[in-house]
């Protein structure tokens, strides 16, 4: 991809240094970037740096002589506008429709048929404050695309949600917003393994890394589809997705699926998560029940863990979905099966889940993270063989895009 015009608005955050890296990457990929900086942004990053990176004058002042209509011209010139880093102040000001600085005027004046993205960066308390939550929801409703924040240590030293996305994620999100698929699908991808607590510090889980789901989500998003990723906490992230949410337990995943599927008419769900077959029903030590998720069972004791089978989430996906015609992609991991055994397992999954596509792969054939020998089965008996994760992701994109549009049920 090359040659898009990008208006890059910086606001006042320490994450300004990451924005410079993102600008540099955009320019290296052949895009033309014009930088706009609020007065606060220039306390963190100098105009010399921004001019050096973009090769253009940095715009700051709404009333600059000779450039007074720059906010309109810039909005018309840009194929996409990104605010990065986006402070709590600017997010809240945009949500109130304030236009008393250049950034606010650009937001109000932008052509709403073009992408407008924001990469928030702030302290976890600022990010979770009701004012910010409401502003984000409001702007989202007006078409602003938020590049998901990360969890971890923010510049102020506090740990939580609010850390700005990394430069490669920002570049991927901008490029994804400019990609033009023939039909933009709304896709929900699940990935990673569930974990069931035994006490306050130990879990029963599986070895899923979430890598395959993340690769599929990433490919779909980069091709311009609107992707939500529901992934296990700590599992691999995907770049360019519109919504990134984590789960821990089976119950968390179950709840999040209901909420997401009923709130948005997804065209497809790629259900790649390694859902545990069992949840912890109870733990006993010396005949006494241990309260759920509390404390730490003594290392020298011999706990008894009772498990209960979990329902098959894949079977109820369509019934829970606001779009009853949602395309369901299910996964079947076999172990050392010959072709006939694998075919029987796939057939059984089609029968009980009503899936449109089943991806089958065999544990014995896995070699490394990118190598992913697998077969995409269609309900009418068709087969597409894939060798790698990225190959699988591209084939799924091609097949899902070529399926007739499913009718969304009325809200
Ligand atoms: C050292 C320092 C770091 C800051 N980092 C952030 C930040 O990451 N996110 C944020 O929302 N505000 C941050 N602020 C506060 C903003 O800079 C302040 O609200 C400012 O008015 C934002 O103006 P602007 O949105 O017009 O750029 C920081 C302030 C200082 C002094």
Image: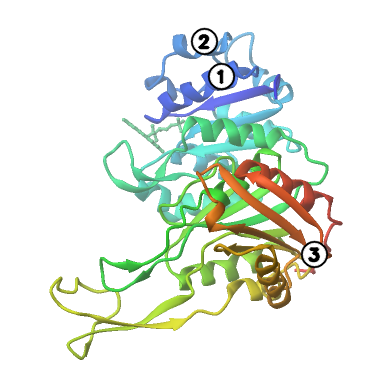
Q: Secondary structure at mark 1?
A: strand
Does residue 125 lie above or below 89 as drawn?
Answer: below
Task: Please tell me whether mark 3 or mark 1 is closer to you in this view.
Answer: 3
Q: Is residue 60 visible?
A: no
Which is nearer the eye, 169 or 107? 169
The mark found on residue 51 in the picture is 2
How many residues crowd mark 1 within 10 Å: few (<14), some (14–19), many (20+)?
many
The quarter holding residue 352 reads: bottom right
How many residues crowd mark 2 within 10 Å: few (<14), some (14–19), many (20+)?
some
Which residue was labeled with disc 1?
35
The mark found on residue 100 in the picture is none
Q: Quadrant of ligand 1?
A: top left
Q: Is residue 309 visible?
A: yes
Residue 299 placed where, x, y %? 15, 70
Q: Secondary structure at mark 3?
A: loop
Which residue was labeled with disc 3?
408
Residue 63 placed where, x, y %? 58, 17
**Residue most toward the bottom?**
287
Sooner in the amino-acid sequence: mark 1 or mark 2: 1
Residue occupying the point 59% across, 47% down: 372
Sooner in the amino-acid sequence: mark 3 or mark 1: 1
Residue occupying the point 24% across, 74% down: 294
In this rendering, the count of numbered labels is 3
Does residue 220 lie above or below 84 as drawn?
Answer: below
The Cα atoms of the two marked residues, 3 and 2, are separated by: 47 Å
């Amino acid at each position: 991809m090359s040659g898009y015009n990008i208006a890059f608005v910086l606001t006042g955050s320490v994450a300004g240094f990451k924005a410079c890296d993102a600008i540099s990457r955009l320019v290296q990929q052949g895009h033309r970037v014009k930088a706009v900086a609020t007065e606060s942004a220039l306390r963190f990053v100098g105009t010399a740096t921004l001019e050096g990176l973009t090769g253009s004058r940095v715009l700051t002042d709404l009333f600059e002589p000779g450039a007074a209509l720059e906010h309109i011209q810039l909005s018309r010139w840009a194929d996409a506008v990104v605010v990065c880093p986006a402070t709590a102040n600017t997010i809240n000001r945009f949500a109130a429709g304030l236009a008393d600085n250049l950034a606010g005027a650009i937001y109000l004046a932008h052509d709403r048929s073009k992408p407008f993205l924001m990469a928030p960066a702030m302290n976890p308390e600022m990010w979770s404050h009701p004012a910010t939550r409401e502003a984000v929801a409001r702007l989202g409703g007006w078409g602003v695309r938020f590049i998901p924040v990360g969890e971890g240590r923010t510049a102020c030293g506090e740990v939580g949600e609010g850390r700005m996305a990394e430069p490669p994620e920002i570049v991927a999100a901008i490029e994804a917003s400019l990609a033009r698929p023939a039909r933009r699908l709304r896709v929900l991808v699940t990935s990673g393994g569930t974990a069931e607590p035994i006490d306050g510090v130990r879990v029963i889980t599986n070895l899923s890394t979430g890598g395959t789901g993340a690769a599929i989500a990433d490919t779909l998003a980069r091709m311009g589809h609107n992707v939500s990723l529901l992934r296990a906490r700590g599992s691999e992230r995907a770049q360019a997705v519109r919504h990134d949410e984590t789960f821990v337990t089976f119950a968390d995943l179950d709840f999040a699926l209901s909420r997401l599927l009923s709130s948005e008419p997804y065209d497809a769900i790629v259900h790649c998560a390694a859902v545990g077959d069992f949840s912890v029903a109870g733990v006993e030590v010396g005949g006494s029940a241990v309260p759920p998720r509390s404390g730490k069972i003594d290392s020298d004791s011999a706990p008894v863990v009772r498990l209960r089978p979990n329902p098959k989430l894949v079977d109820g996906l369509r019934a829970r979905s606001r779009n009853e015609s949602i395309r369901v992609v299910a996964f079947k991991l076999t172990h050392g099966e010959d072709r006939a055994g694998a075919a029987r397992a796939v057939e059984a999954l089609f029968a009980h889940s009503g899936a449109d596509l089943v991806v089958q792969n065999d544990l014995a054939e896995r070699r490394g993270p990118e190598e992913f020998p697998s077969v995409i089965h269609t309900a009418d008996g068709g087969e597409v063989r894939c060798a790698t994760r990225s190959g699988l992701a591209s084939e799924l994109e091609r097949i899902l895009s070529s399926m007739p549009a499913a009718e969304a049920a009325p809200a």
